[in-house]
Image (spheres, rainbow, N blue to C red):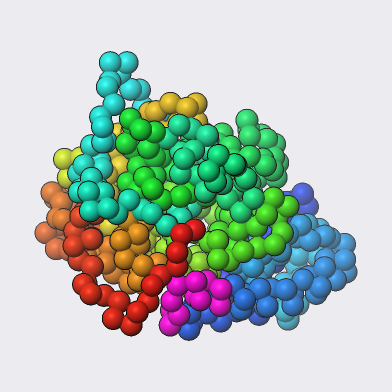
Amino acid sequence: MLATSLLLSAALGASIETAAVEPVLVVWREQAELGDMADLRGDARALAAWERLQEVATKQHAQAEQLARTHDGRVLRHYTVVNASLMQLPPSARQALRADASVAAVVADRSFKLQLPDTEAVPATLTPQAVEASLTLIKAPEVWALGHLGQGITVASADTGVQWNHPALISQYRGNQGGSVTHAYHWHDAVHATGSSCGADSAVPCDDNSHGSHTVGTMVGLDGVNQIGVAPQARWIGCRNMNAGDGSPSTYLECMDFFLAPTDASGQNPQPLLAPHVINNSWGCPPSEGCTPEQSALLETAVNTLRAAGILFVAAAGNSGSACSSITDPPAYFAGSLTVANARIDNTMNASSSRGPITVDGSGRMKPDLSAPGTSIRSSLNNGGYGNKTGTSMAAPHIAGVAALVMSAEPFYQRNPEALELLLTQAVVPMTLTQTCGGIAPSVYPNPVAGYGRIDALRAIELIPSPLLSDGFEGEGIR
């Protein structure tokens, strides 16, 4: 799987930036083979994947440093989630490096600005509901009543950051350990340049947009009054991969690297057994703003790695609808992503939600996979308050939250994204649809508008076979 993406990247040929000030991602030809990881369960899967990846990547470091010196450049960072290095190189050296037998591709690392949802005005007279309407719609309270609230599960946010001490988020932060707070292994800032209120390399979780805080709130948020989170007893960790909405392949990769094996405050001593069970990804790498096929192939390799390591990768479909085949941005169209569309509370599809089938890579792949509430969703903001936002960015964390509920209820699904994804795509209800895309009628499921349908958390629990664990598998324990 990994080798396939990298061969694609090499075959496409790198579109190299000529500006000397911009770094490049050098993808090494040797990559770890992880095709057998799905045969493992629980922590054994996470650990085995990490050890194999680290062995391959570590062997490359000395050669990368030597090649950088030879070509009058320097190495800025090595990655493990993909065997690659971020290098500062003059344009002529980049061309020479591509001819090296050990190099699969040289990929530009340019940043691009995302179109993040704006916070919607909330009437001053609005009284918070005990449970937000979107949670009631997907029957999360019925699952809580069964005792499944996400206990023992870690969700991750790759986004604009998180206001970690927000009243609805602080108790669920994994770095908050009974009143003693540590950010090591629970937070990483992949932004190494100034340009926003968070600055660079923030040692403390910080959100310069509210987008990340909002999505984390939908996954786990609860302050005693405002019940905004699907899985209020799951723990969260975070990584800032955008600087005031500007992301790049290197920042996206760095957060994926961190989640594969979280590190201490100095970026050392990685611990794969502290990896999250599910990552919410409400970001995109749009071709319209400069994301190239080479960058997409590199990101897809990283997504496949995380999946091989046992992590469910949830991705927002994008907000370029309502045209068919409008899912065009990585990571939404990747086969390894569980892609989520934006449903309204009345069970219709939001017009802005991107549709399939996937044509941007010629695959014709059926996407999205699932739908979830994403319209006027009330959740936490980075000012300590609450506000409404609309977009597939708001729909995706509902799915991540339901995944946490399922893994909490049944340990068999922990570190088992294949089985978990299969269950979630069955735990659906039909929607009220009228649009035909890809020649598939709206009454047929899955379809390129809503996927398999709108998620139902209670149905997900009811569909868990019982007894499931005849082999005695007991899961992982609390993270």
Residue 259 drawn above or below residue 465: above
**Depth order, front residue of 156/180:** 180
The residue at 25%/29% (across/down) is 129
479 lies above or below 241: below
Q: Position of residue 434 (x, y in %)?
A: 14, 50
The answer to whether residue 300 is seen in the rendering is: no
| Residue 235 visible in the picture | yes
Count all numbered tags in the image, as a single digit: 0
User: Between residues 43 and 456, which one lies in front from this camera angle?
Assistant: 43
Magenta stretch, residue numbers: 38-48
26 falls in the magenta region: no
Extreme residue toward the top, this view = 124
Q: Residue furthest front?
A: 178
Residue 337 is situated, as x and y percent measured from the top left of the image, at: 41, 63
Q: Is residue 80 above or below residue 248?
A: below
Asked whether, in this view, residue 362 is left or right of residue 439, the answer is: right
Image x and y of residue 265, in percent: 69, 50
Q: Is residue 203 above or below residue 118?
A: below
**Residue occupying the point 68% across, 54% down:** 264
Report the side of 254 relative to 216 (left or right). right
Q: Residue at x 33, y 82 (%)?
A: 471
Q: Quadrant of residue 56?
A: bottom right
Where is residue 127 shown, x and y percent of the image? 27, 22
Q: Nearer the viewer, residue 376 or 411?
A: 411
Specify the principal SS of the magenta part: helix
At 23% from the left and 60% from the top, the residue drawn is: 460
